Image (tube, grey):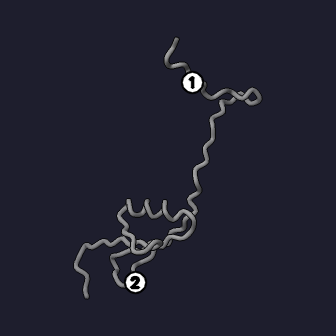
Amino acid sequence: MNPNPPVAGPEKDPATGRTEHPFVMTPSADAHVRLDAHPTHTSAVTATITGPGQNRACALLTARGFEALTEDTLVMARIDHEESQ
């Protein structure tokens, strides 16, 4: 007796002759991200996220260096020089 029996793979559709693969839908990323210059720091960018995919968009932006200010607003600052006060 084989301890690892073969697993049934995708089968050909008799009508089309094509191999059918199971289709898994990924959740829609309907988040909208608005990028803007920070109002008081010229070297900073703000990102405001709206829509149902906020968590995913927030995770992607934080992975790229943005930091969360609020639940739907993030900021990324690039300081190449001292800013005037």
Disc sitting over residue 39 in the figure: 2
Q: In this view, does 80 lie above or below 9?
A: below
Q: Is residue 38 above or below residue 22?
A: below
Residue pointed to by mark 1? 7
Q: Position of residue 19 (x, y in %)?
A: 65, 30
In which image quadrant can residue 6 be found? top right
For label 1, the SS is loop
In which image quadrant can residue 43 be found? bottom left
Instruction: Give the farthest residue toward the right.
Output: 15
Q: Where is residue 83 in the image (x, y as percent from the top left)?
A: 25, 82
Q: Position of residue 72 (x, y in %)?
A: 47, 72
| Residue type, label 1 | Val
Q: How crowded is mark 1: few (under 14 residues within 10 Å), some or many (20 or more)?
A: few
- Identify the residue shown where x is 63% and y is 37%: 22
Q: Is residue 14 above or below residue 64?
A: above
Mark 2 to mark 1 CA distance (whole Å): 59 Å
- Identify the residue shown where x is 41% and y is 78%: 37
Name the one closer to the observer, 1 or 7.
1
Front: mark 2 or 1: 1
| Residue type, label 2 | Pro
Q: Position of residue 74 (x, y in %)?
A: 41, 71
User: Quadrant where the C terminus lies?
Assistant: bottom left
Q: Which of marks 2 and 1 is nearer the N terminus?
A: 1
- Identify the residue shown where x is 55% and y is 65%: 31
For label 2, the SS is loop
Marks 2 and 1 in Cβ contact (< 8 Å): no
- Identify the residue shown where x is 57% and y is 24%: 7
Image mark count: 2
